[in-house]
Amino acid sequence: MNYYKVLKINSLIRSQKLKILGFGFLLVTNKRFLNIFIDPILLCNFRCKMCYFSDPNYKPSKLKFDYDTLKRISQAFFKNALKLQIGCGAEPLLYKYNSDIVKLAKQHGVPHISITTNGSLLSFEKIIELAQAGLNEIIISFHGASDKIYNKLMPGGDFEKFLNLLQNVSEAKKSFPNLKLRLNYTVNPDNLYDLNNIFDLLEKYKPDIIQIRPIRKLGNSEYKDFDLKKKEKEYEYIINRIEHFCNDRRIISILTKNLPSVNITRYIPDIAEYSYCYISPEHIGDKNFNLNKYSSFRKFLIKNKICKKIYKDVFLEKTRKVDSDISFANYEVNV
């Protein structure tokens, strides 16, 4: 399955109600309807300045999943997963059972499995281990395309190690051609111009996918300048260059082409409220879901009258815009 073609189709369907109706059909027929994001551990070895881990008052949880809990989670969720992403807000490579998560997902037929990481702990041997387990995609987060900006915005990281990681992934892909490399870059006013250096990285290491997205305030962080609007023309210029560069080289690009206003808006009803599923040692799918009580997340949803909610949102609810600090689909996917 090409997950990015699915994303592309999703972005072309403008009606949230139509998407929710499709979700309802997949739910009732026991198909795959969940995009699962799992943080098996809630720690990080970096203190990236745009991340809440850089907040001196933040106290990371020491909770983590044991293997037995992972297996029960896989039985309850993975049958209905369209995608599984390991790593969402924390660093998954601080956890020792990542290959086991991948294997469990493969056993349940999850069609797209990725891991999101800063990559500092991802050795060549670990890449091979994850690929052999069935991993489809490695997503590497970085915030600078030069040593000066990368090292400044990602305390704990080292740009030379980052380049070595890209080389290791490129080498591993020769043995595992179905393994994809994706790069994620979050833009702020201080690293915007550093995007001019990204073309050399794209040319040399040939990632399959790249995502460029503007900074958003997600919790307290050391970094405080969230106003990219003051550099809107420069932002749009470099994004257009990247789009054309990627199109010419058949690199999938996921781009926020137009900067959102200071107050982000989203639609209600919203398909993300249905299909997005976050799992961590502190939150397993839904605040009311209990692994000891329910063996299936789908059955939990049905028992808690999700079909009634779908009917209400599709046929009775009036579509409207609301202010939000979250926007799940403010990008364009170029496949």
Image: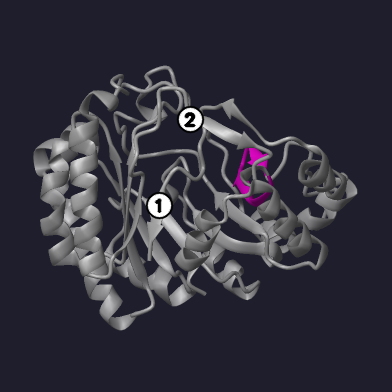
Which image quadrant is residue 269 in? top right
Q: Residue at x 51, y 27 (%)?
A: 325
Asked whether 163 or 71 is in front, the reply is 163
Which three-letter amino acid code belongs to the residue tagged 1?
Answer: Glu
Q: x and y percent of residue 99 in the render?
A: 48, 65
Which three-letter amino acid code belongs to the residue tagged 2?
Answer: Pro
Position above or below: 248 against 275: below
Q: Residue at x 60, y 64 (%)?
A: 82
Q: Which mark is residue 42?
A: none
Q: Is residue 65 visible?
A: yes
- For the stretch drawn in magenta, what is the main secondary structure? strand
| Disc 2: CA contacts within 10 A as few (<14), some (14-19) or many (>=20) | few
Q: Residue at x 30, y 53 (%)?
A: 119
Q: x and y percent of residue 35 in the render?
A: 59, 55
Q: Which mark is residue 60?
A: 2
Q: Earlier in the sequence, mark 1 or mark 2?
A: 2
Q: Is residue 157 visible?
A: no
Q: x and y percent of residue 331 in the render?
A: 41, 47
Read off the residue under disc 1. Answer: 332
Which image quadrant is residue 214 in? top left
Instruction: Give left or right: position of 113 versus 258.
Output: right
Which residues are the magenta region? 274-284
Q: Is residue 299 magenta?
A: no
Marks 1 & 2, CB-CB < 8 Å contact? no
What colouring does the structure picture have?
A: one colour
Viewer-side label of 1, 2: 1
Give the quarter of the figure containing the C terminus.
bottom left
Position above or below: 249 against 163: below
Asked whether 311 or 328 is in front, the reply is 311
Position above or below: 153 against 298: above
Q: Report how far apart the C-alphas of labels 1 and 2 lie in the structure.
A: 33 Å
